[in-house]
Amino acid sequence: MTSDIGDGRPRRGGTKAIEILATGPRALVEDLGRPGLARLGVGRSGAADRGAHALAQRLVGNTPDAAGIEVTLGGFAMRARGDLLAVVTGAPAPVTVDGRQRSLGELLTLLDGAELTLGPAESGLRSYVAVRGGLDVPATLGSRSTDTLSGLGPAPLAAGDVVPVGEATRALPTLDAIALAPAGAEVVLRVSPGPRMEWIAAPEALIGPVWRVSSRSDRIGVRLEGEKIARARAYEDAELPSEGVVRGSIQVPAGGEPVLFLADHPVTGGYPVVAVVLDADVDRAAQVRPGDVVRFVHGETPRA
């Protein structure tokens, strides 16, 4: 078996694998990323919605850091090579196995040759496909994640790729399905003040209005459109040296429209970080799609 993984070059695989039939707009191999390497200029990356990824892995008996597939806006299809156990979580999308309708969060037995498909996502942006044993692709700096900013990790999946599946090492959990909450019409995100909040004329300029998600958003960040945020008079012509930024940081560039950093954000940024989305809410931000409405509210200050 061959697989377009790691550096994008085919290599020999194991006895179980998945064959990619269609990817939709984008399908990436992701795990929980590369934490702790920012000092080397390497961002964490990993699944944009960590909770949905970890849930999928848990349902098939994998460790949370096992590698799975992050599917953007559905349109994904794969074929089992060998008997497999799979599950889909994250953005609601029609799930079928050999043409029969199945459910999000349901354990799916895929016999050799069975085809799993995801239709267009009905809401949300990213769905997660986990296979028992995890995807057995080479790790780069300790992670199997694709980082779209740096280019580290496996190449984006393409039709015809055959990706090896690893051996199961843990017992299955005692449940075979889980109910998943539908996404709301308006996404409300809690924030704490950022280190450069004083650079904008008024905090209410960020907290008060509703924001619309731009079509220019990606795994690096959610770009928001709305009323421009004005700089405070004392900082109108000021320059800010690059400084460290974290997942959930909200930067306000000179144009005045905020950017909320996601999984593939840079490790430093040169625009003021005026607020930070609480870590518990960043997964929700990772599921917004172009045209969705976002509103920020004051949240608790994160514990050190």
Image: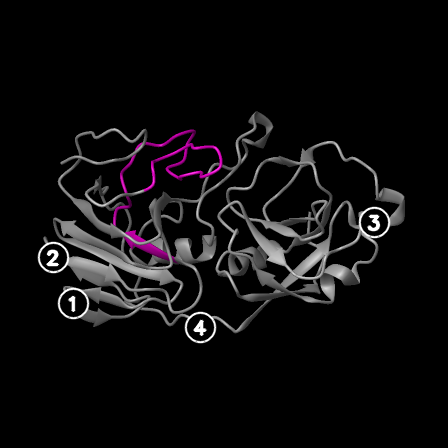
Q: Earlier in the sequence, mark 1 or mark 3?
A: 1
Name the residue tied to disc 2: 111
> Judging from the image, what secondary structure is the residue with disc 1 in?
loop
Depth check, front residue: 296 or 228: 228
Distance in Å between CA atoms under marks 2 and 1: 14 Å
Which residue of the protein is positioned furthest toward the right in this rendering? Answer: 234
Name the residue tied to disc 3: 198
Measuring 72% from the left and 45% from the top, which residue is drawn there? 254
Residue 111 quadrant: bottom left
Distance in Å between CA atoms under marks 2 and 3: 59 Å
* Amino acid, disc 4: Pro
Name the residue tied to disc 1: 99
Q: Earlier in the sequence, mark 2 or mark 3?
A: 2
> Judging from the image, what secondary structure is the residue with disc 4 in?
loop
Location of residue 241 with respect to 19 vertically, above or below:
above
Distance in Å between CA atoms under marks 4 and 2: 30 Å
Quadrant in which the N terminus is drawn: top left
- The residue mark sitting in front, 2 or 3, is 3
Q: Earlier in the sequence, mark 2 or mark 1?
A: 1
The answer to if 55 sits in the magenta stretch is no
Location of residue 204 with respect to 47 vertically, above or below:
below
